[in-house]
Amino acid sequence: MESGTFSNHCDTMNLSNNVSLSSPDRRTEVENVFLALFVGIVMLFSVFGNTAVIVAIFMNRLLREELSNRLTVNLAITDLSNGLLVMFSSLFSVIADSWTFGPIYCDLICAINYCLIITSMLTLCFISCDRFQAITHPLHYIHRMKPTHIYIMIAYAWFQGVVFSAVPPALRWVEYDYWEAICAIQWQKQKDEAVYYVVVAFLLCFLIPGLILIFNYYRIIKQVKTKVTCPSSPISARSYSTSSKAIRSLLIVVIAYFVCMTPFSLTKLMKVLIAEENVLNSHFNSIASVVAFISSAVNPLIYGIFRKDFRRAYKRIFVSIFGREKIHNLQTSWQDYSS
């Protein structure tokens, strides 16, 4: 009897962590190929792009000395970790068309995923706080903001991320979601138990940081416009013009993050609020999950497009890897092709 009971328990765990085995509704082979290609491309962009951001900051003295770029490095580390761990697990499960890593890693990867999402959000919030101080109180910024303050922000972001992400695995709320292609909280099954967790997590990890972020950037934009239109000196005007360009890139990073995370957040909210299990289209779940992954890949592109200092740093990296002559030949070939 005991061996039979243990066997049934193992079977239950396998089914709960491998939903794809019991789900009659599955992706076609063509859909799997396209999904795997898309996740793979986003993963590569995330890994190489965020590695370039980290290397660029450490190689460039001016970027390295800018305090706020310590927070930028932290954001890049979360995005890089997302690519290496979460996206890789998702890609492998799509290729295998099931979860093959077992229940323990399923819990772990879910915790990592939520930890990185929360840490990214808090890091964006702290970047806005740092920029608010730098723009609105430039004379006092050097005395008010020290490297220790930045490291405390980073430590707190990770601490809160770890605390909130540890709860679902500890309470056994996690299963592999076939259509999201990643291990996640099964909100519909844990609705009664998870409601308090959802409310507290939403307030502390998203709503409050989001409101702080919006308030800070509203004040920053207002201040920059005032200083640019009524400068006290030409140097001041140029300084604030440069600051406004940096702020613009950060604003686009924030907007891109919210755009990418909105479908993912909406699917979670609907699963909490609506009791029916099949309320959402299965393919919409997959799209929401993949679009959320994109948020970890777009930041390096935004820096490269909107910030000259990062463009120069990227160019130095490419030159050091490929050599100036190869890059010149590549540019010449591209110009010949375009003409």
Image (tube, grey):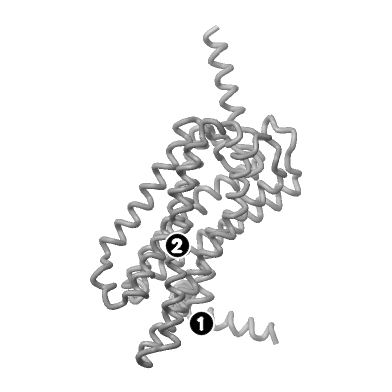
Q: Position of residue 250 (x, y in %)?
A: 47, 69
Residue reaching furthest to the top: 1
Residue depicted at x 59% and y 45%: 269
Q: Position of residue 25 (x, y in %)?
A: 74, 37
Residue depicted at x 55% and y 19%: 9
Residue depicted at x 45% and y 50%: 205
| Image quarter (top left, top right, bottom left or bottom right) of the N terminus | top right
Amino acid at dot 2? Leu
> Does residue 123 sit above or below 307 in this rendering?
above
Left or right side of 27 for 209: left
Q: Residues within 10 Å of mark 2 (few under 14, many from 20)?
A: many
Residue nearest the viewer, comparing 219 with 236: 219
Q: Position of residue 172 (x, y in %)?
A: 50, 30
Number of marks in the image?
2
Q: What residue would you read off at disc 1?
A: 325
Of callouts 1 and 2, which one flags the residue occurring earlier in the amino acid sequence? Answer: 2
Badge number at residue 213: 2
> Does residue 291 sit above or below 16 in this rendering?
below
Q: Position of residue 15 (x, y in %)?
A: 61, 28
